[in-house]
Image: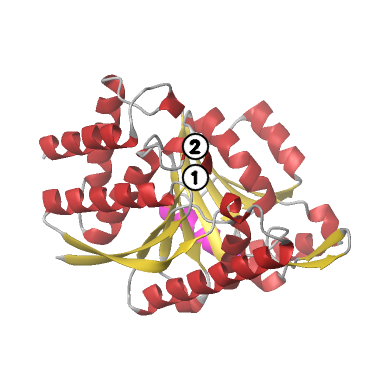
Amino acid sequence: MDSVVGLAVGRGTGPELARVFERTLDTLGEVWGTRFSVSRSPRLYHSYFSLKGLGPEQIRESTEGDAAQYEQFCRTQASAGIQAVFRTAINAQSLYLVRQRLRAVKVDVIESTGATLLLVRDEAQGFYTGENTHSPGAVSRTTEFSRDITDEVIAFAVDRARRQWPDTGADQIVMAYKFHLLDGALGEWVAESAARHGVDIALAQPDTVNRNLIERGLSPRMMIIGGNEWADVMHPFLLDRFGRERQENRFTENAHLDPAVRGLLEYQTVHGSADDIEGRDIVNPVATVRATAAIAERHGGCAGAIGAMEDAITATVAQGVSTPDLGGADSTTSVLDALLKCVESAR
């Protein structure tokens, strides 16, 4: 069986994690008898730190160039029938231009004791999207919310919840948006969309959602549709409080609502580019190997790869093998060696 996977690499620790991804994919392919090939973007995308020192106009040109090339890369992968792209961290301004244009939503499932949280992050609109206009001493940023995109996000989220819980769907759906800034329009759109999709949705201010989560915790099958600004800040908190997990160990999926790229899933680590440790062979590889195992199982027919990788992670932690961010003293390469050895020996 042959499978093609896309790969896009940013600066900072991106090249190191790309090597982790390719080596892990090769090993999983060998163990499961699947031949993987990688369709790699020819561009090395900027991180925020690689742009520092440039003037505003140079940064705008660079970020727009990265965005245009990455958008085209995604469209090319989708048109070729490729279903998965692994991407390391890239500069946020470029990334959110692409997410706006391809109408992206991010999905993470956070398992807690007696409850599951399905977090759906609206990346297609809001204050992270838009472009800047510079004048002396000021930057103006124009953003947009729309009825159609709001409905698309809700439709995607409701469908995703029904796939997560086929028998029941979500028992609670909350939307966390700063809707008071939108003159009541978002409330009307959400009510219309909820009625159309046959669900109850509680639209709440971010601080209200936060207070309720702290006081009441999660319901057994809870979905939060988060405005990008709230979900970006709260994602690490939700992982820590309810998932008992560090963001350095996690990956997420980004789906696209643009019809031309529907079906293309982008996998990424939750952590950023970590430019401060670039080239030192100490970046944590766990999020990357987890993403790779998910791609191998879901898109390459390697049934059981996710479970095998989780068992390998548990075994290496028990052996005391970890990178410095988790209190260990091992290199990226050493941790990866231990993980892949566990996977190989278990099959």
In terms of depth relative to the viewer, which is nearer, 57 or 149?
57
Q: Is residue 9 above or below residue 81?
A: above
91 with respect to 320 (left or right): right
Q: Is residue 158 above or below residue 286?
A: below
Amino acid carrying mark 2 in the image? Gln
Amino acid carrying mark 1 in the image? Val
Give the residue drawn at x 22%, y 36%. Answer: 337
Image quadrant occupied by the C terminus: top left
Label 2 secondary element = helix
Which stretch did the figure color magenta? 153-163
What residue is shown with label 1?
Answer: 270
Q: Where's residue 8, x and y in %?
A: 41, 61
Are the residues tagged 2 and 1 within 8 Å (C-beta)?
yes
Label 1 secondary element = loop
In terms of depth relative to the viewer, which is nearer, 326 or 109?
326
Is residue 336 in view from this perspective?
A: yes
